[in-house]
């Protein structure tokens, strides 16, 4: 069983007892987070699609840690102009474990 849930404007396919990396949340490490914007539910081959969301389904996750992703290098250059600039960027992420998918 899996669901597609909307978290911080992005859609994630999540399974119970698995990890997902999402944009940084305000919750502290060890706290539980509830998401109720479920777009799709798949259960033993039966697919339910929300219009736009499925009501009475909650995804509960636990914040394990706040981390930074790998560095991304942004390099810009204009040839024959003497212009080049190198920048780096590390996205701030939250590691989340999906504890349960509750159907009320």
Image (spheres, rainbow, N blue to C red):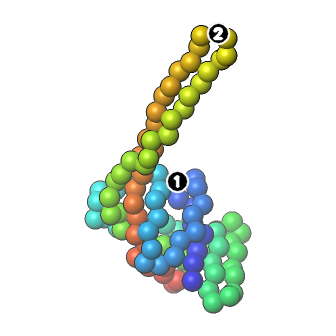
**Does 41 sit above or below residue 83?**
below
Regarding mark 1 in the picture, which secondary structure is present there?
loop
* Mark 2 closeness class: few <14, some 14–19, many ≥20 residues within 10 Å: few
Total marks drawn?
2
Q: Are marks 1 and 2 in contact (CB under 8 Å)?
A: no
**Which of labels 1 and 2 is toward the front?**
2
Q: Is residue 61 visible?
A: no
Q: Position of residue 7 (x, y in %)?
A: 53, 59
Residue 55: percent from left, percent from top: 60, 74
Residue 3, given in percent of the width and then of the height, sits at 58, 74
Q: Nearer the viewer, residue 90 or 61?
A: 90
- Which residue is found at the position 58% from the left and 53% from the top? 9
Res 27 label? none
Q: Which secondary structure lies at badge 2?
A: loop
Q: Which residue is mark 2?
A: 81
Residue 101 in sight from this viewpoint: yes
For disc 1, the marked residue is 8
Q: Quadrant of the N terminus?
A: bottom right
Between 79 and 4, the one nearer to me in the picture: 79
> In terms of sequence position, does the residue under pointer 1 or pointer 2 come before the other?
1
Residue for point 69% across, 80% down: 48
Crowd band around label 1 with a 10 angstrom C-alpha radius: few (<14), some (14–19), many (20+):
few
Seen at 69% across and 87% down, the residue is: 46
Q: What's the CA distance linking mark 1 and mark 2? A: 41 Å
- Residue farthest to the bottom, as pictured: 44
Position above or below: 1 against 11: below
Residue 93, above or below 75: below
């Amino acid at each position: 069983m899996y669901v597609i849930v909307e978290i911080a404007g992005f859609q994630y396919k999540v399974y119970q007892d698995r990890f997902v990396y999402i944009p940084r949340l305000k919750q502290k490490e060890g706290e539980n987070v509830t998401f109720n914007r479920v777009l799709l539910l798949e259960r033993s081959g039966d697919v339910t699609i929300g219009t736009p969301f499925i009501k009475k389904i909650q995804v509960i996750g636990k914040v394990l840690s706040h981390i930074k992703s790998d560095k991304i290098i942004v390099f810009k250059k204009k040839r024959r102009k003497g212009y080049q600039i190198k920048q780096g960027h590390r996205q701030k992420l939250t590691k989340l474990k999906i504890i349960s998918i509750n159907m009320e």
